[in-house]
Image: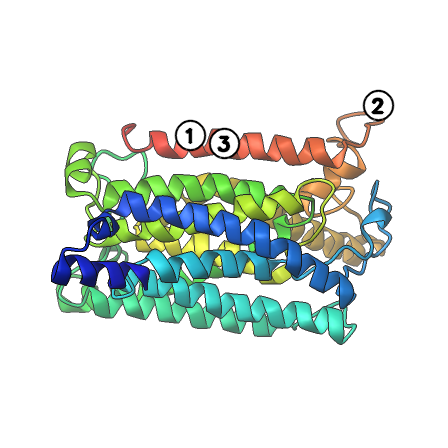
Amino acid sequence: MLYHLFNYLHTQFNFPGAGLFQYISFRAAMAVIFALLIALVFGKYIIRLLQRKQIGEEIRNLGLEGQLSKKGTPTMGGVIILLAILIPALLFGDLTNIYIRLMIITTVWIGCIGFLDDYIKVFRKNKDGLQGKFKIVGQIGLGLIVGLTMYFYNAASETIKTTIPFIKENEFDYSWLSFMSGEPAQTIGWIIYIIIVIFIIVAVSNGANLTDGMDGLLSGISIVIGAVLLIFAYLSGNVIYADYLNIMYIPQSGELVVFMAAFIGALVGFLWYNSYPAQVFMGDTGSLTLGAIIAVFAVVIRKELLIPVLCFIFFVESISVMLQVLYFKYTKKKYGEGRRILKMSPLHHHFQKGAGEIPALIQRPSQPLPEAKIVIRFWIITVLLAILTIVTLKVR
């Protein structure tokens, strides 16, 4: 909104200083600052409100160190993140930009699903929250919105392409997956693309949700991921840098830098209260939304094939849960008693129970790792993977 106001003042009245709003770098800096201040200032009051309303986390005793001390800690803190992202994005973003609109829709859409899930847990006293099938339906709905928006926005283009990491000719055309040629290939290619977009949103959103199990874990990881996506958006939206690096130039995508700057600022501010020991939990309001934002952002800037590297922690956390469940069901059917691969899933709780013990390979007892140490090590792994992701710009 401020962008459009100062743009009008600049073009119509040559208002002193209004021209600064033409620069993405200036608006991104303002978005970071505003998002950080909103999270820090309003976050304090929102936490107090949650405490007065007794909107606290219900903790099941799973035998984890320090677990019961978290009982009653305010949840639904994802509201802080949503406000800190949306307000700067609306103030400093170009609201005529299709990609900015798509990111705002993503934030509100999944934010509402997560909020409903938290509401059912807290106020209806149903620990299961919103049924999984309704979450999936909501995520699929967002995938359709994103996929169809990309289709109609790129309707004049014959193909929809993305970037393949580590390949010299690094542009991949989804129509190749149809194994056809001509107009049918284009149509089927778009259908395949939309299906892939839906899968990515569902997978990353739920992966982020599973990762959110320790103080500051998801917040810190998402900040690193957001910083890498911001760099890619800036480079892809700048024709000079895109040409120099021989990467796909995506017109108007540079505006996404403003949104991602707000995303990073909001998470840094939230981490002030969410770091160990946490004063507030983000709940599904935050975790589902963070994953969806990361997924849609990567899709929009055509970097979705880098998600397995950049979001490796999300991937591993999800796989650990799936393997644990499948193995338990398999052994229960075969032996009459369910067995587990890990001491506890998701993976971060396995380390919290006992650091890396694999009974078949290690005979000595393992020691549990403190929560803060696990979080920092997961952050370090994410930073290393982020560097590797950036390196893909030149390593082909």
Residue 362's quadrant in the figure? top right
Q: How many marks?
A: 3
Is 259 situated left or right of 155 in this image? right
Q: Residues within 10 Å of mark 2 (few under 14, many from 20)?
A: few
The mark closer to the camera, 2 or 3, is 3
Tell me which corner region of the image, top left, top right, bottom left or bottom right, holds residue 380. Answer: top right
Q: CA distance from mark 2 to mark 3?
A: 31 Å
Q: Amino acid at mark 3?
A: Val
- Which numbered circle lies on residue 383? 3
x and y, in percent, of residue 91 in the image: 36, 60
Residue under pointer 1: 387
Tag 2: amino acid = Arg
Q: CA distance from mark 2 to mark 1?
A: 35 Å
Question: Is 197 on the left or on the right of 187, as rendered?
Answer: right
Q: In what element is the residue under mark 2?
A: loop
CB atoms at circles 3 and 1 under 8 Å apart?
A: yes
Q: Earlier in the sequence, mark 2 or mark 3?
A: 2
Quick check: 208 left or right of 214? left
The CA span between labels 3 and 1 is: 6 Å
**Residue designated by label 2:** 364
Residue that appears at 62% across and 43% down:
272
Give the x, y percent position of residue 106.
43, 64
Q: Amino acid at mark 1?
A: Ile
The disc, 2 or 1, on the residue closer to the chain's N-terminal end is: 2
Q: Residue at x 83, y 52 (%)?
A: 335
Q: Quadrant of the C terminus?
A: top left
